[in-house]
Amino acid sequence: MSAICAVLGIARRTAYYVGRASPGGRYHRADDATVLQQIWAVTSSRATYGYRRVWAMVNRTFRVGYNRKRVRSCRSTGSCWPRASTDAMAGRTSDADVQPALVLGRFPDSVLEW
């Protein structure tokens, strides 16, 4: 076994390693559903809030004392990332008009002068 591990460039302990998943998956607190509802209530109007702003707004709005890590964990595991509105994209026919000038071959003079 040591010769095989040497050829592969891995430690012998790695070859014998058996990963163990927790039986119930990721840990969830009993009141995570409440936290998710509060997060949705705060973020439903806008999709670009980060977890720090959401944490501050949830604590301020509902007068609770959640930890930032708890809000981030609940938000990421609960699919609590609202999707951006696609209304702005409705009139667009293609993405060709949004590509940068360098891709299209239009270089500014300062770029070509090295």
Image (cartoon, grey):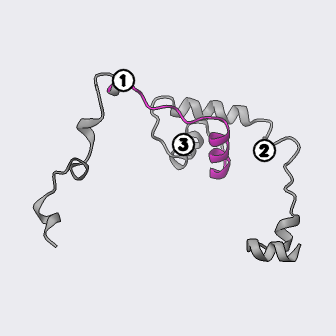
Where disc 3 sits, the SS reads helix
Q: Residue at x 79, y 40 (%)?
A: 29
Look at the image and give the residue range highlighted in magenta: 65-88
Q: Residue at x 85, y 73 (%)?
A: 12
What is the spatial separation of the Cα atoms under label 3 and label 2, in whole angstroms?
Answer: 22 Å
Q: Label 3 amino acid?
A: Val
As drawn, is 44 to the left or to the right of 33? left
Q: Which image quadrant: the N terminus?
A: bottom right
What residue did someone put label 2 on?
26
Q: Position of residue 33 (x, y in %)?
A: 72, 32
Q: Count how many numbered circles sit on residues in the image.
A: 3
Q: Position of residue 94 (x, y in %)?
A: 29, 30
Q: Is residue 104 magenta?
A: no
- Mark nearest the camera among 3 and 2 is 2
Mark 1 residue crowding within 10 angstroms, few (<14) / some (14–19) / many (20+): few
What residue did someone put label 1 on?
87
The residue nearer to you, when weighing 36 against 105, is: 105
Mark 3 residue crowding within 10 angstroms, few (<14) / some (14–19) / many (20+): many
Q: Reading the chain from its start, which is encountered first: label 3 or label 2? A: 2
Location of residue 88 (image quadrant): top left
Q: Label 2 amino acid?
A: Arg
Dots 3, 1 in contact, CB < 8 A: no
Q: Residue at x 16, y 56 (%)?
A: 107
Q: Which image quadrant: the C terminus?
A: bottom left
- Mark nearest the camera among 3 and 1 is 1
Q: Label 1 amino acid?
A: Asp
As drawn, is 46 to the left or to the right of 10? left
What residue did someone put label 3 on?
54
Is residue 105 placed above or below 62 in the rendered structure? below
